[in-house]
Amino acid sequence: MNKTLSLIVATYLLAGCASTSSMKDNNSEIEPDIDKSTIPIGIFTYYDDPAQYHLPVEYFLIGKFVTQNDCLLFEHNNELYTPVLPAKYTKYTKGDAQITVNREAYNIGETGDISARPLEKKYIGNFITEGPSHCLLAKLMRIEVRSVKSP
């Protein structure tokens, strides 16, 4: 009787281990559902999940987008950053004189306020699209989608 009970328990435990090992970790990164043909290439972008709740962006920096060595960069306080833009909300083609993030248009080389925050590389996660490797500076600037303004 003990042997039979032991065998049943062992079988149950092994079956349980096998089934849980094939389960996907809930904390693993979700593959975004993005049509990559509609997002800009040649720049660094991140996935901004529209299903997540976002507080309205209340902060902004005074700076400008610049191009240098075939790279799109962001200049703030005379320092250059690699901008990381929200993939689904950014419209830009290499050589354009303007970049659009959601409904905000920014002229390349023109100073203005933009919703952005400096970010360390280790906190960026995976890029959706990447620019040339020489364009990835040590300092990153995460460009945020501004909330829709009320009339």
Image (cartoon, rainbow, N blue to C red):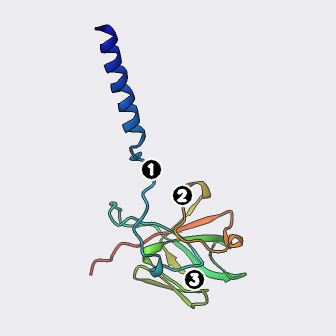
Q: Secondary structure at mark 1?
A: loop
Q: Nearer the viewer, residue 15 or 87?
A: 15
Q: What is the quadrant of residue 103 in the picture?
A: bottom left
Disc 1 and disc 3 in contact, CB within 8 angstroms: no
Q: Nearer the viewer, mark 3 or mark 2?
A: 2
Spot occupied by residue 122 in the image (x, y as percentages of width and height): 60, 54
Residue type, mark 1 in image: Ser
Spot occupied by residue 86 in the image (x, y as percentages of width and height): 47, 71
Q: Earlier in the sequence, mark 1 or mark 3?
A: 1
Q: Secondary structure at mark 3?
A: loop
For residue 63, which numbered disc appears in the image? Answer: none
Q: Nearer the viewer, mark 1 or mark 3?
A: 1
Q: Secondary structure at mark 2?
A: loop
Spot occupied by residue 58 in the image (x, y as percentages of width and height): 41, 67
Q: Earlier in the sequence, mark 2 or mark 1?
A: 1
The CA span between labels 1 and 3 is: 39 Å
Residue type, mark 2 in image: Gly
Residue identifier under label 2:
125
Q: Earlier in the sequence, mark 3 or mark 2?
A: 3
Residue neighbourhood size for the residue with mark 3, other residues' Cα within 10 Å, grouped as few (<14), some (14–19), many (≥20): some
Residue type, mark 3 in image: Thr
Q: What is the quadrant of residue 78 in the picture?
A: bottom right
Spot occupied by residue 124 in the image (x, y as percentages of width and height): 55, 59
Q: Nearer the viewer, residue 34 or 20?
A: 20
**Where 77 falls versus 98 (above or below)?**
above
| Rendered residue at 64%/70% (across/down) | 81
Residue identifier under label 1:
28
| Rendered residue at 45%/50% (across/down) | 28
For residue 111, which numbered disc appears in the image? Answer: 3
The CA span between labels 2 and 1 is: 12 Å
Left or right of residue 13, residue 138 in this image: right
